[in-house]
Image (tube, helix red, strand yellow):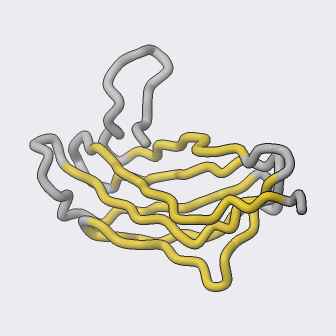
Amino acid sequence: MEFEKTDGGDNRIPPFSIASTKVYTVPEGYRLLLKGAMCSMTDEHNMPLDVWCKIWLVITTPGFLGNRYFLISDALTFVPSQEIEEGHSLYVYLHNYSGEYVSATVNLIGVLESLRE
C-alpha cells in the first residue's frame, strides 16, 4: 500500500507526521480473520530507515486493534486472530519520527472466510 496525497503530489510520509489510509472493507457475506501485519519504512535514498517509527491498526468497530514501535521493519501479530466483520473497514496509521520524508510498505496477513455454507 502507498499513502497517496489527495492533491496528486508526493506519496511519501513527511517528517514527524502521521499518515493514515483505509486499507480494506470486508465485503458482504464474508469476515476477515486478521493474523498480523509486516511493516517497513525506507528513507529518501530508498535505504532502510534506522529511526523508530510506529504502526497501529484500527477497524470501524470496536476500533483500536493494536500498535507497535519498529526499527527498519517488524511484524505486528494477533493471537488469536482479530475478526473483522462484513461491512467493516480496516485502517492503517504510520508515525514517521524521522526528520526526512519516508516511504512505507505494509503487508497484511489474514484469511477471508465466507459466511455462507
The residue at 38%/61% (across/down) is 39
The number of discs equals: 0
Q: Nearer the viewer, residue 29 or 96?
A: 29
User: Which quadrant is home to the C terminus?
Assistant: bottom right
Residue farthest to the top, as pictured: 7
User: Which quadrant is home to the N terminus?
Assistant: top left
The residue at 41%/45% (across/down) is 17
The residue at 21%/43% (across/down) is 100
Residue farthest to the front, as pictured: 117
Task: Place residue 44 in its image quadrant.
Answer: top left
Q: Nearer the viewer, residue 99 or 81?
A: 81
Examine the rendered structure and indicate whether residue 17 appears above or below residue 48.
above
Q: Nearer the viewer, residue 114 or 98?
A: 114
Left or right of 9? Residue 76 is right
Q: Position of residue 86 (x, y in %)?
A: 83, 51
Q: Nearer the viewer, residue 48 or 19?
A: 48
Q: Position of residue 97 (x, y in %)?
A: 33, 56
Q: Position of residue 40 (x, y in %)?
A: 31, 59
The residue at 70%/72% (across/down) is 82
Examine the rendered structure and indicate whether residue 56 appears above or below residue 45.
below
Residue farthest to the right, as pictured: 117
Task: Place residue 53 in its image quadrant.
Answer: bottom left
Q: Position of residue 10 (x, y in %)?
A: 32, 25
